[in-house]
Image (cartoon, rainbow, N blue to C red):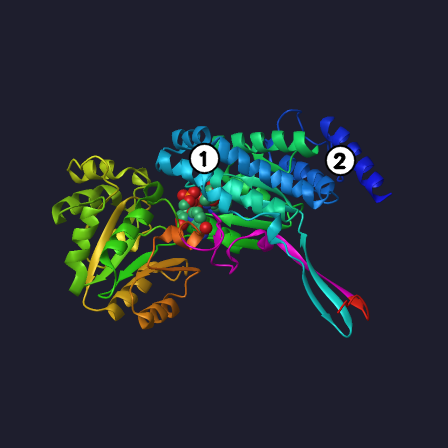
Amino acid sequence: MQMTEDLIRSVVQQVLSQMGNGDAPTNGTTRVRPSGTFGVYPTADAAVQAAEAAFRAFRVRPLEDRRKAVEIIRNICVEQAEELGRMELEETKIGRLDHKIIKLKVALTKVPGVEYLRTENVSGDDGLTLTDFAPFGVIGAITPVTHSLPTLAGNAINMLAAGNTVVVNAHPSGAKVAAEGVRRFNKAIAQAIGIDDLITIIDPPTLESAAALFDHKGVRLLVVTGGPAVARAALASKRRAIVAGPGNPPVVVDATACLENAAKSIIEGGSFDNNLLCIGEKQVFAVADIFDKLMDAVGRHGGFRLNPQQIDTLTKVAFKPGDDGALHLNKDLVGLDAAVLGKYAGVEVPKGTQIVFGETGADHPYVENEQMMPFIPFVRVPNVDRAIELAKKSEHGYGHTAMLHSRDTSVMSKMGKAMDCTVFVVNGPSSAGLGLGGEGVLSFSIAGPTGEGVTTPLTFCRQRRTAIVGGMRFV
Ligand code: NAD
């Protein structure tokens, strides 16, 4: 009987969905829903309405449909990684093609799905109590230019696995690839389970459309991934917000570290997509005992060392004085190749160079700012306590990510406590903190300011308890 009802409901929804109207508007307005748009809408209101209708259809579907939707997003990212990665690079003009492909092909396979939602239970003399994980409804997501489609896809996997639908306001400079991804995901999902618009996107996105999404009554939860301005705006919003904000991850290297591993790790993490990742190694504090040896090792593993004059030349292009007199990051240099940074520094670097690097003071603009480019400043410090102190200062209290290279467990504890970061990686590249070469799941939204950490499907759930009194204990 149950099977038959489910089947009928599913067929009805499929037919309604294919007619281009899976549900009627509830607020008396006419829904803007041109057929064949597959999730792309011109306004926040239209996108939210479509996502609300999709949620009403999705919430009564079996878990198997969520699994199918999540698998479709993953498969499209993996199978079309080269095409979509190229599209993202051509549009945003920042980062590296090889790493854009890895983000879609490898990283997204580490984002957990429906299997992550395990009902918790307590069974005792008084009965059985279950804690289930239920969806919120429509989630509003703001995504960054640094990983436009990967963040959208990662958020969508987590959120749909949890049973929600999502409306995205992408960064204007990565909006085309984001909209193309949404079209492809929805088209395939609609074909597989008969519901369109599980993911909708506002095209074109603007600050006004982001504000409209922040304030829309149909949005139950906001998830914001970006820099300081949008993080502040989200924290000030009336709506509940999960905020994945900026970082400026420092690395500390002490005298007990394996210098070969430290050098390789700093290069691997700091060169990934030309250091666009919020977790990427941005500045290094190394103790004087091993400083020169570490610099040699970085040079041997793909780094090209700039001399002080070359660093000055590069810095004058990378940071410009603003009206407030302070130096500000020149965004035109964000995400450029090491070879291009070399040219700005006045030097031709060898082919295959992964990062440019050099020695600076602790108050250098490259140390103090989240530069998001593959020049890494190394600061010589007298001892590990001073290294940790300066690392903490350079992180500005974001509490985002920090790395340590040391074999001394007391230093590990000391730095872990002092930094108080969401992600702390010991003896590996930053990417190990997201399950790439380290244990654990991956997300492109690491919610430090609001405390959810590396986001998972559980981040996007409401906990619901059911207590069955006096029965259902089987042992
Ligand atoms: P950004 O802050 O310029 O833009 C992020 C998003 O916010 C974009 O969609 C943009 O259009 C929107 N936005 C910006 N200001 C806004 C405002 N006042 N109101 C509403 N929306 C606004 O950042 P970006 O250059 O795209 O991305 C890089 C930044 O994001 C870095 O600071 C990086 O550390 C951070 N980031 C953090 C994480 C994380 O997981 N914590 C992940 C990726 C990137």
Q: Nearer the viewer, residue 23 or 291?
A: 291
What residue span does the magenta drawing correspond to?
Answer: 438-467
Q: Position of residue 57 (x, y in %)?
A: 73, 39
393 over 87 or under it: above or below: below
* Quadrant, the N terminus: top right
Q: Position of residue 270 (x, y in %)?
A: 31, 48
141 over 453 or under it: above or below: above
Q: Nearer the viewer, residue 215 or 303?
A: 303
* Quadrant, the C terminus: bottom right
Indicate left or right for 452 with 471 as reference. left
Residue at the limit of the structure toward the right, as seen here: 1
Looking at the image, which residue is at 39% across and 29% down?
90
Looking at the image, which residue is at 18% across and 53% down?
295
In the rendered image, which residue does mark 2 sit on? 23
For residue 239, say whether it is visible.
no
50 over 252 or under it: above or below: above
Q: Amino acid at mark 1?
A: Gly
Mark sitting on residue 437: none
Q: What is the quadrant of residue 133 in the picture?
A: bottom right
Secondary structure type for disc 1: helix
* Residue 246 covered by magenta stretch: no
- Asked if the residue at label 1 sits under 8 Å from ligand 1, the reply is yes
Q: Nearer the viewer, residue 375 or 314?
A: 375
Q: Position of residue 403 (x, y in %)?
A: 34, 59
In the rendered image, which residue does mark 1 sit on? 174
Q: Earlier in the sequence, mark 1 or mark 2?
A: 2
Q: Position of residue 149 (x, y in %)?
A: 48, 37
Secondary structure type for disc 2: loop
Looking at the image, which residue is at 42% across and 51% down?
228
Looking at the image, which residue is at 66% across and 47% down?
163
